[in-house]
Image: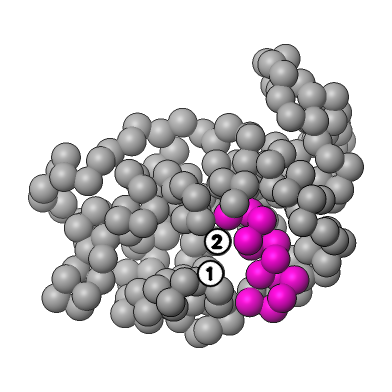
Amino acid sequence: MKSITVTAAALWLAATGLGAQGAEMPAMPPQAALCGSCHGPQGQGVEPIAPRLAGLSSEYIQKQIKDFQTGNRQNPSMTPMAMTLQGDELIAQVAAFFAAQEPAPIEVQHRGEQLVFSDNAGQLAFQGDWSRELPACVTCHGPSGIGGGLFPRLAGQQAGYLKSQLQAWQTGSRKGDPDGVMANIAQKLTAAEVDAISHYFATLK
C-alpha cells in the first residue's frame, strides 16, 4: 500500500508541474503517464522492469520511440507502447518531459584525468583497446558516460539493462545505430567484458 501511495503522489506532482521539492517542472503530457507506469513518474526507472529515462536527451528518446515503431528495436512490451504515440509532436512532448527530469548526480571524470586503471572495465571505458580497434566508451558517450544528443547516458543506468542492450547489439536484435558503430563495437566484447562494463557504468551514481 505504501509503494502505491508514493507512486500516486509522484504522478500527481508530475502532472501538476511540481517536482519533489515543489520546483516548477514541465507538465506531464497525458500520454507520458503510461510510460511512467513502468519507467517511473520521473523516469528514474523501475528495475528490472524498465530502464531510467531521466538524463537521456529528448533527441535520443524520440529516436528510440521511432526505432521501436519501425522495428529497428525489438521488445514485446515497448513496441505496442511506442505505437500508442502517433505523430512527431506527441513523441516530442513525451520525450521533452522525461528529458527534463534530473538524473542522480555523479562526480564526472574526464578522459585523460586518470592514466592507469586497475580494472579492465575502467580502461575500456576511458581508453578503449586499440589493439582490437575498440574506442573508449566516453569517446561518444561523454565524460563518465553522461551522454548527450543521440548518445545515451550510461552513468547510473541499470547494469541489467546495459548488459541486455550490448547483447542485443551483438545478436542484431537492436539496430538503427549510424554506420553500425555500436553493433561493431559490441561484437568485439567478450561476455566478461559486457558484464564488467555494464556494472562499471551502473555503479557511477
Kindly identify which residue carries mark 1: 164
Tell whether label 1 touches label 2 (CB within 8 Å): yes
Q: Secondary structure at mark 2?
A: helix
Which residue is depicted at the point 19% across and 68% down?
129
Separation of disc 2 and disc 1 at Cα? Answer: 5 Å
The image position of residue 99, as x and y in percent, is 62, 41
- Secondary structure under tag 1 reads helix
Instruction: Using residue 126 as the reference point, say whether residue 43 is left or right of it.
Output: right
Bounds of the magenta segment: 60-72
Q: Classify 170 as above or below 101.
A: below
Which label sits on residue 161?
Answer: 2
Left or right: 11 as drawn, with respect to 60? right
Does 138 appear above or below 174? above
Q: Main secondary structure of the magenta part?
A: helix
Q: Which residue appears at 72% of the width and 14% of the height?
A: 22
Residue 65 is a magenta residue:
yes
Crowding at dot 1, Cα within 10 Å, few <14 / some 14-19 / many 20+, comes out as some
Name the quarter where the C terminus is drawn. top left
Q: Position of residue 125 (x, y in %)?
A: 28, 56
Q: Residue at x 69, y 78 (%)?
A: 71
**Residue situated furthest bottom in the rendering:** 171
Residue 191 seen in the figure: no
77, above or below 155, in the image: below
Front-most of 61 and 19? 61
The residue type indicated by label 2 comes to: Tyr
